[in-house]
Amino acid sequence: MNIDIELIPTVKKSSIKERLKESLCKCENVKGTVAYWTIDIKFIEELALVLQRDNSYYCIDLHSPTNIDYLANFKSSGSNIFLHNYEIKTNSKNYELEEKKKVSYLLHSKIILFEMPDNNVEIWLGSHNFTQRAILGVNIESSFIVKSNKDSKIYKDVLDYLTFIKDNCIVFDVNDVEFYKKLQGEQEQDTGDLVLELIGENVDKLVDEKTIQLLGVGNNDIGDILGKEIIIQILDLDNGKEYIYKAKVIQAGEIDPQNPKSLEIEFSARRYAVRGIDRIPYLKKEKEIDSAILIKHNYFINLEVTNLVTGHKIYVKPKRGKSIWSDISSSPHLERMNQEDVKIVFKGTGKPIKRSCKSEVKYKEFSLQKIYSFGSKITNYLLEDDITSSKNEEMIKEMERKNILVTRLLKPVNKDEK
C-alpha cells in the first residue's frame, strides 16, 4: 500500500478541530501522547468517548500548563489517561536550566495513532499540543497525517514508541489530583498558619493579659491581615517551655516622626515586644506605650490573644521536591542516550533525573528551644537599646528573621510524640 501524507492545517484554514473530530468518529481506537493538555471534555466530546475503549489511551506530561482538573474529568468519564511523571533536577548542571531558565519536563512528543476499520491507520505527527490555541489555530502549528495500514513498518514503529511511553507513565488516579498539583508546583498555595515568634518570661498566661503589642523598625511586612488570626509561638526563658497561642490582629499603624499626629496615640499598660531587623522579639514587662517609646519605631501592631493551643506543634512547611520527587538510579530517557551525549548535556552529573514519589510527607518540627541554650546572655541581647549593636554573630545567626511573620504548619501531636 502506498503511504499517503497530508499536511495540516493548510495556509488558508488554521483550525484542525473538525479534522480531528472526523478521525475520532471513524476510528476504532486512539492512542496518543502530548506535552500539554488544557482542553476539557466539552471542547471535543468525541475524544472522551473514544478514550473509554479498552485499547485506547493517552499519555500526557503532568507539568504545567497541563490542566489536572480537566484530566480528572476525562478519567472520571472512563477515559484511559496516563501521566509522564519525570523531570530534570534543578541542580542537574544542564546548561538550559542554569542559563535559560527552561522548563524541566521530559515528554515533548505529539503523536496520535488512529486505528481505523479494515486494518487502516492514521498517524498524526507534529507540533500540536492539546490546547485550544494549538487546535483552533491561534498558534502557527503544523502536523503530518500519515495514512497507512497495520502491516506497515511505520505503524509498528509508532505503536512501539507509544507503548514505550505508556510503560514509563503512571495511571491517572482521580484520588491523587492534589498530589499531581503539588508536582506541578502548586505548593499548598501558601496554606498554613502565619506565625509570630516571640521570647519572654512568665508567658504561660497571655490569654489573661488579653492584649500585647509589637513595635518595630524596618519594613512593616504584616501586609493586609488586619482582623485575621495568627499564631504566636513563644519560648518562656524562665522554664524553657514553649507555648502556642492564637491571636487576632486588632490594630496596626505606621509611626512617622515627621508627622506629629502619628505620635499622639497612647496605649494603656500592656506587654510589648520590639521587632528588630534581625532578631526574634522579646516580650517585655507591662508598660504604658507613649510617644517617647513610639518615636523610636516605625510601626505598631496590637494583638488580642484569644486562646492557648495544646496538643499541637509547629512544623516547617515541606519544600517542593523533598517528599514528592525522588532520585532514581536510571531512567528511560538516559538509557536510550549515548553516554558521551549524557555527559555533554549534564556535565557529568550522576543522577540528573528524578521521578515523582507518592510517599508520606515527613514534617520537621520547628522549636525555639535551641535559642534557650544561649542561657542568660539572650535576655541582655534582646533588651539592648540599639537593636543592631550586638556583635554576637552566633546568636544573631540563630535568631535572624527577615519577616515579621513566617508561614508554618500547626499540626496535632502524633501519639508516639506525646
Image (cartoon, rainbow, N blue to C red):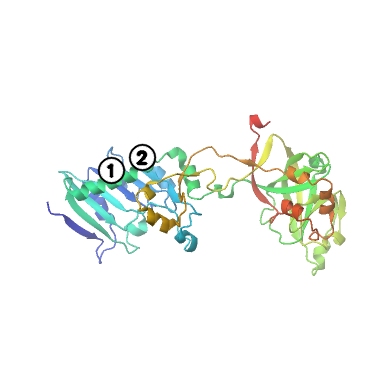
Q: Is residue 40 visible?
A: no
Marks 2 & 1, CB-CB < 8 Å contact: no
The numbered mark, 2 or 1, whose residue comes first in the sequence reads 1
Quote the CA–CA distance across marks 2 and 1: 11 Å
Question: Measuring 73% from the left and 48% from the top, which residue is drawn there?
Answer: 197
Q: Which residue is mark 1?
A: 50
Question: Measuring 75% from the left and 40% from the top, which residue is drawn there?
Answer: 243
Mark 2 crowd level (few <14, some 14–19, many ≥20, 10 Å Cα): some
Q: Is residue 318 visible?
A: yes
Farthest-out residue, bottom: 258
Q: Nearer the viewer, residue 37 or 166?
A: 166
Mark 1 crowd level (few <14, some 14–19, many ≥20, 10 Å Cα): many
Residue 287's label in the rendered image is: none
Farthest-out residue, left: 1
Amino acid type for the residue under numbered disc 1: Val
Question: Measuring 60% from the left and 40% from the top, which residue is drawn there?
Answer: 363
Q: Nearer the viewer, residue 68 or 408?
A: 408
- Percent coordinates x, y for residue 149 in the rendering: 17, 47
Q: Is residue 341 above or below residue 32?
A: below
Q: Is residue 188 above or below residue 413?
A: below
- Percent coordinates x, y for residue 223 in the rendering: 67, 57
Amino acid type for the residue under numbered disc 2: Ser
Secondary structure beneath disc 1? helix
Residue 77's label in the rendered image is: 2
- Percent coordinates x, y for residue 180 in the rendering: 46, 45
- Percent coordinates x, y for residue 167 in the rendering: 34, 41
- The quarter of the picture where the C terminus appears is top right
Taking 221 as reference, is 324 left or right?
Answer: left
Secondary structure beneath disc 2? loop
Taking 210 as reference, is 191 left or right?
Answer: left
Question: Measuring 78% from the left and 63% from the top, which residue is drawn there?
Answer: 255
